[in-house]
Structures are given as structure tokens and as C-alpha cells.
């Protein structure tokens, strides 16, 4: 979705400029902490532990997400190295953030002798809210643009909206499964990752104007194409998720 004249800034006062991307990211972090604290206290985790873990996750998530984004856009950032640290302008890869968050939180939980699976489940609402809000911010940044489509209702596929709806759908699904209270620790997290992986590949990635097309086919009429780099990595992630879910059920 491209909107002419839209500003990436919420407001500008002199040298102070607040961008929609940064605002949505900050709101996501606050929401994540709220839900982790609310449900974590009920499970016996203390507030200091939850807060410390959140800081570790944020740091490792951002590092991982930015590292992967820079890696897959290496030629651009080599020509503009000053932009590598400008995460306020967008450019965080979900799969890199997922990997960074898992590694960072895993190390922390091992050092503190905490249940990583339980805490990972508590992180799902914040992640889903983040996906929902950040994709809206992508509209203001004019990124994650959809492919041009001849037979669609709009000139382009609104991939940012698709991505936001994916986050909202997974949040509602998580809440439904959590209320049932029948799942073992870790099941909610890996179910979320599996759901996101499938929906991202089938919907958002298929209609996204993405230069990272390894090989494949593009339908200009409907603005659909495959295979992107994410498409090619999707089967491996699905296998990992199914393995983890099967392992959790067998416990």
C-alpha cells in the first residue's frame, strides 16, 4: 500500500522527531511487559525476573533482527553504512529477531535456572501485538510494499495490512488456546511460530514486492509471486516447529 504524501513522523518539534515506527515498537514493548508481568506473576515468577528477561529479549531480538536485515541487504548498507544502526527507520527481520530472542532468552534462563518454555509462552501476546502495530507503521515508512496487481481492488496488494491482520489473528488464536489451559509449557509459543510461518509464507510473502526472489514465477494480474528467500526457508522452520510441538506433547 502506497499513500502519497504520508509522513513517517508522528510529530516534529525542532530537533525532536518521533517516528511512527519507533512509537509502535515502544508500545509493543510496553504491551509485552504488561502481559508477561500479569500472567507471569500468576505462575510464580517475580517482577524483577520478568523485567530483566524482557530487557535481554529486546536487546537480543533487535540485534538479531537487524543483523539479518542488514545481511540480506548487504550491498545497500555497504553503500550507506551510517544507516546500519538506524532501526527507527524500519528494517527488522522477524526471523532474525526470533532467532536472536530465542538465543538471548535461552542463555538467560539457563543461567538463572528458569523454565524457558513457560516464559516463551508468556512472550507471545507481546510479539503478536508488535507484529500487528509495526506492520501499520510500515505504511507510514512506505516499506513492505505489495506487488502491483491488475485484477485487484487496488493498484497494489496491501501487504502491510495483511501482515497486521496476521498478527491480530495469531493473538486471538493464542488467547483462545491459553484460556483452554490444556497445553504444556512451550506449546503456545511453538504453535504461534508455526502459525506465523505458514501465514507469512502463504499470504504476506506471496504478495509482497520483494527483491529477494531466488527463482520462480510472478503473476502480474493478481500481484502474486514465489519463491522468495523466506519461502525457501519456510519448510525448515515448519519442520523445527512440528518437532518441538511433538516433543512437548510427548513430555
Image (cartoon, rainbow, N blue to C red):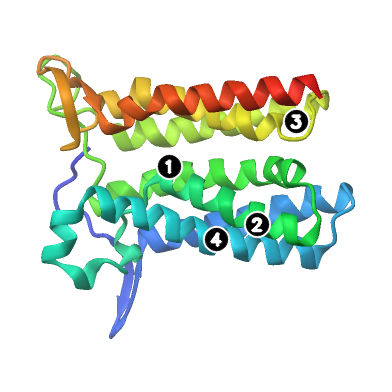
Front label number (2 vs 3): 2
What label does residue 95 carry, if any? Answer: 1
Q: Earlier in the sequence, mark 3 or mark 4?
A: 4
Q: From the image, state whether disc 4 or disc 1 is nearer to you.
A: 1
CB contact under 8 Å: marks 4 and 1: no
Which residue was labeled with disc 3? 178
Residue 135: x percent and y percent? 38, 44
Residue at 71% of width from left, 65% of height from top?
Answer: 51
Q: Quick check: 42 left or right of 157?
A: right
Where residue 59 sits in the image (x, y, percent)?
A: 52, 64
Q: Say which quadrant the N terminus sits in.
A: top left
Image point 27% across, 32% down: which residue?
229
**What is the C-alpha distance between the residues marked 3 and 1?**
24 Å
Helix or strand or loop: what does disc 2 sit on?
helix
Q: In this view, does 243 lie above or below 2?
A: above
Please, what secondary structure does the residue beneath circle 3 have? helix
Relative to 41, does residue 26 appear above or below in the rendering?
below
Q: Residue 172: tell me if it is visible.
A: no
User: Whole-Å distance between the Cαs marked 1 and 2?
Assistant: 18 Å
Q: Pointer 3: residues within 10 angstroms few (<14), some, or many (20+)?
A: some
Disc 3 to disc 4: CB gap under 8 Å: no
Q: Which of marks 4 and 2 is nearer the N terminus?
A: 4
Q: Which of marks 2 and 3 is nearer the N terminus?
A: 2
Q: Name the residue under label 2.
A: 107
N-term-proximal mark, 1 vs 2: 1
Determine whether label 1 and label 2 are within 8 Å by CB. no
Q: Distance between the residues labelled 4 and 1?
A: 14 Å
**Callouts 4 and 2 close, C-beta under 8 Å:** no
The dot on residue 75 is none
Residue denoted by label 4 = 58
Nearest to the observer: residue 97 or residue 243: 243
Amino acid at each position: 500500500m502506497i499513500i502519497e504524501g504520508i509522513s513517517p513522523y508522528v510529530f516534529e518539534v525542532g530537533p525532536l522527531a518521533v517516528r511512527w515506527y519507533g512509537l509502535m515498537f515502544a508500545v509493543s514493548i510496553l504491551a509485552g511487559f504488561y502481559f508477561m508481568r500479569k500472567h507471569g506473576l500468576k505462575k510464580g515468577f517475580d517482577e524483577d525476573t520478568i523485567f530483566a528477561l524482557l530487557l535481554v529479549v529486546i536487546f537480543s531480538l533487535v540485534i538479531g533482527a537487524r543483523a539479518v536485515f542488514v545481511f540480506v541487504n548487504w550491498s545497500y548498507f555497504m553503500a550507506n553504512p551510517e544507516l546500519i544502526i538506524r532501526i527507527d527507520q524500519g528494517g527488522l527481520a522477524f526471523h532474525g529477531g526470533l532467532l536472536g530472542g530465542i538465543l538471548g532468552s535461552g542463555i538467560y534462563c539457563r543461567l538463572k535456572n528458569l523454565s524457558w518454555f513457560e516464559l516463551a509462552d508468556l512472550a507471545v501476546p507481546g510479539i503478536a501485538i508488535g507484529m500487528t502495530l509495526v506492520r501499520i507503521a510500515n505504511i507510514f515508512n512506505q516499506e513492505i510494499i505489495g506487488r502491483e496487481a491488475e485484477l485487484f481492488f487496488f493498484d497494489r496488494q496491501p501487504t502491510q495490512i495483511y501482515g497486521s491482520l496476521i498478527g491480530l489473528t495469531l493473538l486471538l488464536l493464542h488467547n483462545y488456546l491459553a484460556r483452554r489451559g490444556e497445553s504444556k509449557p512451550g506449546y503456545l509459543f511453538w504453535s504461534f511460530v508455526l502459525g506465523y510461518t505458514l501465514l507469512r509464507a502463504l499470504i504476506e510473502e506471496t504478495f509482497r514486492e520483494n527483491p529477494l526472489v531466488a527463482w520462480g514465477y510472478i503473476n502480474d494480474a493478481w500481484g502474486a509471486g514465489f519463491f522468495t528467500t523466506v519461502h525457501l526457508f519456510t519448510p525448515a522452520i515448519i519442520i523445527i516447529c512440528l518437532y518441538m510441538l511433538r516433543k512437548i506433547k510427548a513430555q
